[in-house]
Image (cartoon, grey):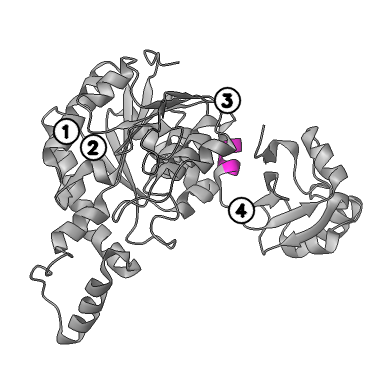
């Protein structure tokens, strides 16, 4: 269960509250992390870092709790800046600005720390759109594979300064992002370093007698219920986002260890099998394409009848005769929900599917041409949320 001796590809996620100190990055901590990861590289392992902290660093650089440090700006812009500051880092525009300021500062610390060990690092910034689009998803995978092959440590972060989603909602302080990355690159282990030292049987903030759970084989409804709420001011993650991440990694056959990132030599101790934090065990390993389908944001919903859903469970194709209703606007090739039970890649656009709903498969070729598939989705492109 905690034998990680054969774990060759490892993703290390570092949370905002672990990485920062007194409003800025904790350089000494980054140096300790770099030393531990460098030791892993020396054993022939490959490591990817998913790092939070850019927004917190940017906010610290601007000193949002006090006065903004001198910045050249026009008179017209002063009012806007004061307005953003009054709203603090909760303001979307200010969070984007803080991310843009903090990201290069964060990478500078990583570069300096890893350079002490002769290790090159690379910056990779992501948005949800990159992972939802199959082409860019595969391009990203190839890029990371190339970097790892060169002995480089990729450092990934959400591209908060340009993200179209509200910051934190897409990946939850990078918890979900780290699991998606681990899934995408077929990682053997995901280490989540947080100020949360383990999963507890009750919310430790409300119940002083709460006990840590050392191993989780299934994320039950009770576990989710006791997970607690959101993160802190600069950190948007919490235990619930970590459980969501664990589910994603579980479908990739990847183990997760959640641990207190401030423990001495925490990464090395986890790899050595020490009982630190909580280990989440996987239950199935889907193909890479199935994982992409499962983890993509659905563009709409195709509602199907009971008979069709039963057929899909038996690894059959979705036929138009089983479609009862279509929600949303999407094109052919989009990932959609099938009721609330599965996700699938549809071969038919929503506008055409609305016309074909409930009809025989032969109607597809009459409407779309003789070369078009006579199904809405094939079994290989249908993934159930449960198993």
The residue pinned by badge 4 equals 298
Q: Are marks 2 and 1 in contact (CB under 8 Å)?
A: yes
> Which residue in the protein does label 1 denote?
114
The residue at the point 46 percent across, 32 percent down is: 201
Question: Which segment did they paint magenta?
Answer: 289-294
Callout 4: few (<14), some (14-19), or many (20+) C-alpha neighbours within 10 Å? Answer: some
Cα distance in 3D space between marks 3 and 1: 35 Å
Location of residue 233 by image quarter: bottom left
In this rendering, which labeled residue sits more in front, label 4 or label 3? 3
State how far apart marks 4 and 2 are (Cα). Answer: 33 Å
Q: Is residue 21 left or right of 88 when viewed as pictured?
A: left
Sequence order check: which comes first, mark 3 or mark 1? 1
Is 130 located above or below residue 64 in the figure?
Answer: above
Image coordinates of residue 202 in percent, x first then y, are: 45, 36
Disc 2 vs disc 3: Cβ atoms closer than 8 Å? no
Dot 2 corresponds to which residue? 121
Earlier sequence position, callout 2 versus callout 1: 1
State the SS at label 2. Answer: strand
For this view, does 381 lie left or right of residue 355?
left
Going from N to C along the chain, the mark reached first, 4 or 3, is 3
> Label 4 to label 1, Cα distance in Å?
39 Å
Q: Residues within 10 Å of mark 3 (few under 14, many from 20)?
A: some
In percent of the image, x 85 and y 55: which residue is there? 364
- Looking at the image, tell me whether mark 4 or mark 1 is earlier in sequence order: 1
Separation of disc 2 and disc 3 at Cα?
A: 33 Å
- Would residue 370 be found to the left or right of residue 259 on screen? right
Secondary structure, mark 3, is: loop
Front tag of 2 and 3: 3
Q: Which mark is residue 283?
A: 3
């Amino acid at each position: 269960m905690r034998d990680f001796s054969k774990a060759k590809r490892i993703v290390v996620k570092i949370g905002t509250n672990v990485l920062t100190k007194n409003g800025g990055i904790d350089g000494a901590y980054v140096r300790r992390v770099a030393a531990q990861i460098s030791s892993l590289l020396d054993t022939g392992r490959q490591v990817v870092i998913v790092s939070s902290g850019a927004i917190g660093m940017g906010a610290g650089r601007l000193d949002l709790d006090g006065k903004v440090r001198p910045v050249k700006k026009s008179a017209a812009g002063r009012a806007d800046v004061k307005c953003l500051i009054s709203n603090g880092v909760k303001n979307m525009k200010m969070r984007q600005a803080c991310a843009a300021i903090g990201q290069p500062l964060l990478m500078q610390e990583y570069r300096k720390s890893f350079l002490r060990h002769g290790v090159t690092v690379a910056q990779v910034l992501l948005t949800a759109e990159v992972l939802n689009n199959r082409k860019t998803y595969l391009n990203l995978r190839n890029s990371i594979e190339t970097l790892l092959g060169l002995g480089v440590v990729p450092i990934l972060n959400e591209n908060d300064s340009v993200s179209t989603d509200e910051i934190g909602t897409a990946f939850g302080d990078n918890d979900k992002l780290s699991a998606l990355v681990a899934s995408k690159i077929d990682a053997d282990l995901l280490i989540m370093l947080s100020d949360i030292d383990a999963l507890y049987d009750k919310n430790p903030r409300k119940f002083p007698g709460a006990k840590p759970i050392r191993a989780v084989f299934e994320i039950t409804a009770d576990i989710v219920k006791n997970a607690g709420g959101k993160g802190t001011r600069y950190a948007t993650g919490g235990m619930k986002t970590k459980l969501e991440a664990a589910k994603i990694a579980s479908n990739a056959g990847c183990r997760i260890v959640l641990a207190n990132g401030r423990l001495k030599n925490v990464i090395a101790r986890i790899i050595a099998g020490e009982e630190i934090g909580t280990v989440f065990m996987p239950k199935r390993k889907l193909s890479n394409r199935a994982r992409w389908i499962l983890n993509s944001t659905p563009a709409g919903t195709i509602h199907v009848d009971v008979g069709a859903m039963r057929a899909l469970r038996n690894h059959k194709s979705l036929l138009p005769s089983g479609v009862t209703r279509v929600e949303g606007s999407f094109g052919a090739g989009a990932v959609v929900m099938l009721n609330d039970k599965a996700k699938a890649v549809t071969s038919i656009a929503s506008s055409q599917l609305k016309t074909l709903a409930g009809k025989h498969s032969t109607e597809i070729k009459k409407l779309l041409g003789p070369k078009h598939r006579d199904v809405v989705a094939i079994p290989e492109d249908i993934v159930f949320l449960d198993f």
